[in-house]
Image (spheres, rainbow, N blue to C red):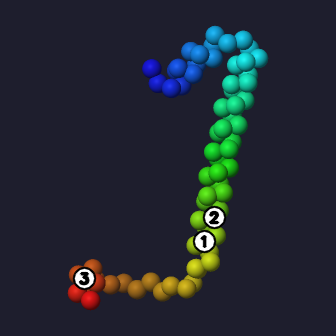
Amino acid sequence: MNIAERIYETVKTMPEQTACEVLSFAESLKAKQLEEEKTRRENALATLAKYRGRFKAEKFERDECYDR
């Protein structure tokens, strides 16, 4: 039995009001996770934006790189 099935089995025996609280809690955790992911992505993109245009990409041979 996976975790979703275990949660379902537990919640289906609860009174409606308690089950609504469990659902609300699960939805708030999901919203928090999405917000944290959005913040992490925005921070990563801001870091990249700070260095935009500062580096020049040059092609090189991998074997020559080790000879340096």
Q: CA distance from mark 3 to mark 1?
A: 29 Å
Which residue extends farthest right?
17
Nearer to us in this view, 25 or 53: 25
Amino acid type at circle 2 is: Asn
The residue wearing badge 2 is: 43
Quadrant in the picture for the C terminus: bottom left
Q: Which of marks 1 and 3 precedes in the sequence?
A: 1
Q: Is residue 51 above or below residue 42?
A: below
Q: Tag 3: Cα neighbours inside 10 Å, few (<14), some, or many (≥20)?
A: few
Dot 3 falls on a residue whose secondary structure is helix
At horizontal 28% and vertical 84% (from top left) the residue drawn is 65
Q: Is residue 50 above or below residue 8?
A: below
Amino acid type at circle 1 is: Thr
Across and down, in percent, residue 61 comes to: 28, 83
Nearer to us in this view, 53 or 24: 24
At horizontal 63% and vertical 45% (from top left) the residue drawn is 33
**Mark drawn on residue 66:** 3
Q: CA distance from mark 1 to mark 2?
A: 6 Å
- Report whether 63 appears left or right of 37: left
Q: Is residue 25 above or below residue 48?
A: above
Q: Tag 2: Cα neighbours inside 10 Å, few (<14), some, or many (≥20)?
A: few
- Cβ atoms under marks 1 and 2 closer than 8 Å: yes
**Mark drawn on residue 47:** 1
**Mark drawn on residue 1:** none
Across and down, in percent, residue 27 comes to: 69, 34
Across and down, in percent, residue 55 comes to: 50, 85
At horizontal 66% and vertical 57% (from top left) the residue drawn is 39
